[in-house]
């Protein structure tokens, strides 16, 4: 094998799709390939070639992502695949090493991704930064609690998703900065969210939408599909699948969920990829009926410690010396003094003794504010040399609300 790495050109698009289909063992319908092309930045793609044969791919989306304190540029790593004939020969490792160098040289201090399998990316310095929940709720019998907020000025409006896109965009813009992990959507990303071909429906019918609004304008929306069915005895047995649901305030949020749960002929409401602190947990009269399951959401890689740590804000003043271990990005592997207060954060190289030592995966896991360090210390990932240092850093890095991207890229 003679391996070379370079960006993939637009002329090599069909080879890229073929590789992805082989790597993932799936067929990519033509409209999905077009949507994928629309979100692809070819100059930020990276192909591995064995001679002329494309055998590995990865790409980066130039995101603006919310982190604690506000939006920053983040490299959204995507489209990772290696041709099955060439797997486990170091191709992904070569792509990841080159990509991290490219990100560093470009000045993007943080990268993020969704993983097809949770065991893949830790070795490349990515830490599990966010989790998500999925719910399987028996409808009708699962009412909202008596305390659920209600606002008589709110109305519900059934809309055609394709016609209400501007409303969704307005609501999403308004929530974007509220939660670490959310990233700004390009028009091509919205095309993908609202795509409604048969392959997108997965047997659950067309994309549907409701908007909640008052006289001043929209205050939330839900996108969903309904897989309609009846039992052999003609009892309604429909399944409502929530795609995304955003409310600008508690009353709008509660009304959207009330509608999901009370929709006629629906026996079950399924919602994937909900934030771990979803207010619905506290809105349901009987939260056990969420039948919740738990998965990893975003993985984050601190590409450049010196730039990344001051790019976010901290929940409490902190002054610690952190020894960072990072075999892939040697520019990170040293001791850093992180100090933060109300005026901002600084991260500078230091030769002072370390207060704590951790692999860069831990900084990635904690970067968005949703991963307390105590559990990672108990798992043997963080070593403390000054008593209390782990708690100080953990408190400073923690953030509310919990991180969540909510949309796979
Ligand atoms: C995952 C994938 C990209 C790995 O590519 P690869 O070229 O085989 O990876 P490498 O040979 O560089 O492996 C590097 C290391 O990661 C490990 N590894 C690779 N894939 C792994 C997986 N799915 N689970 C656990 N470990 C994995 C390898 O065993 C190797 O470990 P080692 O360094 O201890 O020997 C490839 O198998 C693939 O395309 N899978 C299907 C598509 C997919 O899941 N893509 C990821 C989308 S997020």
Image (tube, rainbow, N blue to C red):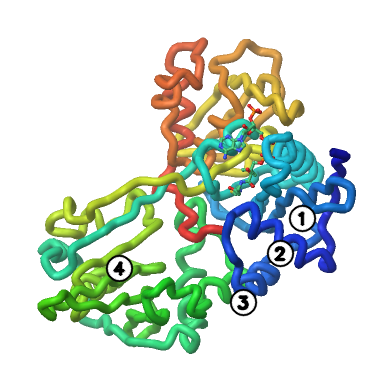
Distance from label 2 to label 4 (Cα)? Answer: 33 Å
Distance from label 1 to label 4 (Cα)? Answer: 38 Å
Of the residues tagged 3 and 4, which is closer to the observer? 3
Q: Residues within 10 Å of mark 4 (few under 14, many from 20)?
A: many
Distance from label 3 to label 2 (Cα)? Answer: 14 Å
Check whether the beta carbons of the residues at disc 2 and disc 1 lie within 8 A of each other.
yes
Q: Quadrant of ligand 1?
A: top right
Q: Which residue is mark 1?
A: 45
**Left of 406 or right of it: where is 32?**
right
Quadrant where the image shows the C terminus: bottom right
Distance from label 2 to label 1 (Cα)? Answer: 8 Å
Of the residues tagged 2 and 4, which is closer to the observer? 2
Please give the name of the residue rendered at 37% of the width and 56% of the height, measured from the top-left corner.
Answer: 274
Distance from label 3 to label 4 (Cα)? Answer: 32 Å
Q: How many marks?
A: 4
Quadrant where the image shows the N terminus: top right
Which is nearer the N-term, disc 1 or disc 4?
1
Tell me: is circle 3 under 8 Å from ligand 1.
no
Please give the name of the residue rendered at 67% of the width and 26% of the height, measured from the top-left corner.
Answer: 326
Which is nearer the N-term, disc 3 or disc 4?
3
Q: Which residue is mark 2?
A: 40
Provide residue 338's location: percent of width, then percent of height.
60, 28
Please give the name of the residue rendered at 17% of the width and 55% of the height, measured from the top-left corner.
Answer: 289
Height in image: 90 above or below 64? above
Viewer-nearest residue: 122 or 109 = 122
Label at residue 162: none
Q: Which residue is mark 4?
A: 253
Q: Which residue is mark 3?
A: 31
Please give the name of the residue rendered at 51% of the width and 15% of the height, measured from the top-left corner.
Answer: 383
Which is nearer the N-term, disc 3 or disc 2?
3
**Secondary element at image label 1:** strand
């Amino acid at each position: 094998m003679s391996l070379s790495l370079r960006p993939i050109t637009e002329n090599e698009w069909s080879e890229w799709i073929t590789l992805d289909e082989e790597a993932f063992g799936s067929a990519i319908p033509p409209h999905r390939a077009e949507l994928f092309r629309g979100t692809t930045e070819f100059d930020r793609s990276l192909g591995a070639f064995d001679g002329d044969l494309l055998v590995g791919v990865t790409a980066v989306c130039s995101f603006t992502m919310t982190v604690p304190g506000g939006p920053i540029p983040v490299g959204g790593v995507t489209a990772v695949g290696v041709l099955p004939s060439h797997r486990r020969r170091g191709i992904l490792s070569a792509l990841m090493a080159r990509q991290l160098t490219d990100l560093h040289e470009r000045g993007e201090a943080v990268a993020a991704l969704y993983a097809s399998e949770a065991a893949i990316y830790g070795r490349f310095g990515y830490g599990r930064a966010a989790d998500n929940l999925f719910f399987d709720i028996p409808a009708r019998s699962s009412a909202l609690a008596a305390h659920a907020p209600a606002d008589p000025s709110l109305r519900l409006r059934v809309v055609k998703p394709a016609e209400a896109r501007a409303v969704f965009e307005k609501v999403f813009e308004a929530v974007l900065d509220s939660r670490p992990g959310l990233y700004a959507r390009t028009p091509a990303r919205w095309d993908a969210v609202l795509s409604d071909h048969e392959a997108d429906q997965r047997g659950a019918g067309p994309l549907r939408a409701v908007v909640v609004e008052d006289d001043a304008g929209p205050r939330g929306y839900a996108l969903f599909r309904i897989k309609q069915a009846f039992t052999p005895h003609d009892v309604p047995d429909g399944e409502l699948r929530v795609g995304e649901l955003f409310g600008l305030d508690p009353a709008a949020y509660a009304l959207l969920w009330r509608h999901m749960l009370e929709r006629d002929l629906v026996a079950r409401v399924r919602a994937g990829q909900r934030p771990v602190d979803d207010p619905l947990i506290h809105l349901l009269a009987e939260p056990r009926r969420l039948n919740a399951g738990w998965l990893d959401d975003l993985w984050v890689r601190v590409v450049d410690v010196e730039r990344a740590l001051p790019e976010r804000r901290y929940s409490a003043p902190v002054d610690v010396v952190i020894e960072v271990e990072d075999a892939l990005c040697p520019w990170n592997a040293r001791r850093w003094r992180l100090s933060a207060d109300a005026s901002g954060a600084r991260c500078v190289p230091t030769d002072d003794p370390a207060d704590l030592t951790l692999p860069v995966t831990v900084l990635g896991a904690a970067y968005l504010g949703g991963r307390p360090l105590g559990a990672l210390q108990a798992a043997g990932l963080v070593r403390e040399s000054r008593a209390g240092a782990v708690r100080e850093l953990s408190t400073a890095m923690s953030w509310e609300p919990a991180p969540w991207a909510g949309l796979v890229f």
